[in-house]
Amino acid sequence: MNTIQNFEERHKKIVHVLFFLILALGLSLRFYQYLMGRSLWEDEAHLALSFVTRDYAGILKPLDYIQAAPPLFLLTVKTFTLIFGNGESALRALPFITSILTLPLFYYLLLSITRSSIAALVGFLAFAVNIAVIYYSSELKTYGVDVAVYILMIYLAVSQYRFVSKRRNLLLGIAGCASLLYSNIAFIILFCVACYMMIGWLKNKKIERAQLYVLASWGILFIAYYLLFVHNHPYEAIQKSNYSFGFPPLPLFSSEFNAFMEKSIHEIGFRLLLYVSKSWSFAYILLFLIVVSIIHAFYKKKYALLLFTCLPILIHFTISLFHIYPFWYRLILYFVPVLIILMASGVSLVANFLARKTHVAISLIFTVYCVYFFSIESFKQYPLYYREVKPTLDHINKNYPHSFIYITTPYTLYKYYHLTGYVKDSLYEGLDWNNGHMSPETYYEAVEGSTSNYLLLHARDPGLDNFYNVLEDLKKRDLIVKEFTYKTYTVSEVKPLRIDSAGIITLNYTNFPPGKTFDLNGKKIVPIWNSDVSSNPIFLAKGKYKLTIRSGGTGVSGILPHLNVFINDNKIGDYTTSADYSPTDFLFEHPGNGNIIIKIVMDNDAIDNSKNEDRNAFIHTINISKAGN
């Protein structure tokens, strides 16, 4: 008896030591990933701009750049930015904190659901080092919170810890309601927990009233949340279009469907979620472990394990078939703990079988073998950062502090870092890269306002922003002067090009670029040389208006450009530009409903070649506002 007790005590000590070692490892990896100072990337910047520019009320309205997130997620992140500023760390604090808090819970969830210390330790290690979970624990998106919601809700449903078991329904009610407002996939997890409760009712032949109250609170809140924030959302159609690749094609088992499933399994298992190595044919071992776990759960009637692993996958896949929520790796990040539970349970079952039928050493070797292939790919990829824009922005700050910048994919990134003070140059414009492949002709039309070298900030992989043909044409025409590239971003210094209708290169024009006359957000620069610049027709109702022109210029012998301003060929005033783009106001009256054309004429163009000076004017923005009745 003493020998058995001693063995059990040693076993507990070993398990405790391993638990704390794995916990320390998982926390260290998460803290380093969070604190490493990596920049935002485009998807984060799209969302970050709303936190920078909106207040609490505004953050609950449809967001900019086709973004959406649950309300408590938005409000919590906004609170962090108000307290800690708009930097990357504050924006990413919520998913990081939830990841830290739920990391140790996953061990106890495994222990409760598998009743095996081997499964708990193996699964805990696989989860602690999983690079996908670590990466999204410090990204401004809800995916990391989805993982935390899964762990928390399942833990509260199955844990036998005294504090939890005595207050289970209260904790489930509060945590479930909060989860609905923090996570996009919470309703799937809550449905699984509800099924678990109902199985308990059938088993005990009794409906628990307290659990009914829990389910009712979830249901009422879900309906209210759906009606207020989800139903008829203005971005629903465009989001479904953007994520069309994430919906399984029908009919089932067609060649397209099978190709979709093969791609999804590859991404989930080996490339983007589990990061399990395929070396030494371990893919087949992984499949074997999952199948063994599922079969054993059916045989032993372990309904909790089946409900909380197989059912979420089936539900998510089903709603994807109906084009409700995509089946795509980032949106199913919470599958990582789901699949790790099955993997770890399978390892435990096979290891115990080998220990009984062969020798403990064989069982230990098999367990180490599995742990190695569960974790080696994550260690190889760590720390993970796909896109890093700051070195490219540093290059622009240092070498091009006052150059005009055209931006493709990283437009919202540049805008975020400009609003938060990291970049100083405010002379930038986003190019329309997201509506198909831009042709070189469209590109040259978009940048025709440039008379001197300008910058083009773009992704190194032009396929990412549909810019391949443009870059190839720039290179063919030898218009790229120099480039700087870091990881996925490139800034190119580009010479201007003008082509007239006959295909002859010219450097003069008289009109604003078609469709790009005004920019009320202050991101447009249109140069003026020795000719005038006329706007496209602008419809105005009858009334009095104020025309505000923000402009600047370069001088010759200290004399800056002098500009005359006309509305429909009637002069309304003149002025000399400033060197700092300060605004100048003009009042005019529009006699009736109809179009106006704004024309600006510079009357003192000059060049002093001896001093290398060229007098040029630049219109930064033109604003028209009502000035009375």
Image: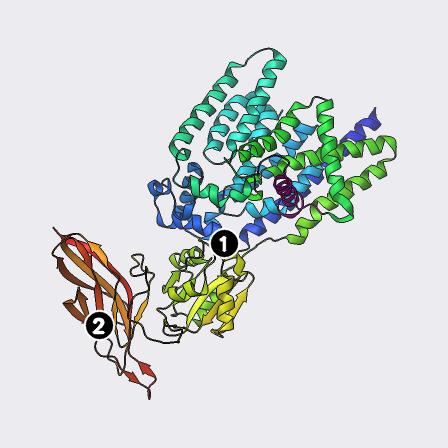
Question: Residue 562: horizontal and vertical position, in percent?
Answer: 21, 75
The residue beneath circle 1 is 41
Q: Is residue 131 left or right of residue 529?
A: right
Q: Give the residue type that dot 1 points to.
A: Trp
Q: Is residue 266 inside the magenta stretch?
A: yes
Outermost residue on the right side: it is 358
**Chief SS of the magenta region:** helix
Label 1 element class: loop
Asked if residue 119 shows in the view, the reply is: no
Q: Residue at x 66, y 32 (%)?
A: 110
* Quadrant of the rendered image containing residue 225: top left
* Quadrant of the rendered image containing residue 615: bottom left
Q: Which residues are magenta?
A: 253-277
Q: Is residue 149 left or right of residue 627?
A: right
Q: How many marks?
A: 2
Q: Is residue 603 above or below residue 171?
A: below
Outermost residue on the front side: it is 502
Q: Looking at this view, is 465 or 280 the one in front? A: 465
Q: Is residue 236 left or right of residue 516?
A: right
Label 2 element class: strand
**Mark linked to residue 601:** 2
